[in-house]
Image (tube, grey):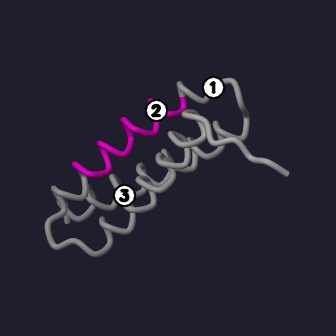
Amino acid sequence: MQHSTTLTKTACIGSLVIGVLSAAFAFITKTPLNAVIMAAIALVVGFTSLYIGRKNIEDMQLATAGIFFAVVGCLIGLWQIYN
């Protein structure tokens, strides 16, 4: 079975990877401002890939998971700043 790698699939997988990395970075960083900045970048990438992959439900699920992890990273960073 042949799988095609399109721009939408690559962008949505990239969104998921960047989201997971931003959440992991928020847990291990000593500077929470950097975690918030990285999570904000991951959110922009996530919403962009969600717009690109809006015609395929599988791509949208990958992008949404990336957005979820980016939000988690952002919330962790904000929590560390204000505590």
Magenta stretch?
37-50
The residue drawn where x is 50% and y is 33% is: 49
Residue at the disc numbered 2: 47
Residue 73 placement: quadrant: bottom left
Mark 1 vs mark 3: in front: 1
Magenta region, main secondary structure? helix
Residue at the disc numbered 3: 73
Pointer 2: residues within 10 angstroms few (<14), some, or many (20+)?
Answer: some
Label 1: element kind: loop
Closer to the chain start, of discs 1 and 3, is 1
Position of residue 40 in the picture relative to residue 15 (left or right):
left
Marks 3/2: CA–CA distance: 15 Å
The residue drawn where x is 28% and y is 75% is: 28
Residue at the disc numbered 1: 54
Label 3: element kind: helix
Marks 1/2: CA–CA distance: 10 Å
- Image x and y of residue 37, in percent: 22, 48
- Amino acid type shown at disc 2: Phe
Marks 1/3: CA–CA distance: 24 Å
Q: Count the marks.
A: 3
- Amino acid type shown at disc 3: Gly
- Amino acid type shown at disc 1: Arg
The residue drawn where x is 36% and y is 35% is: 44
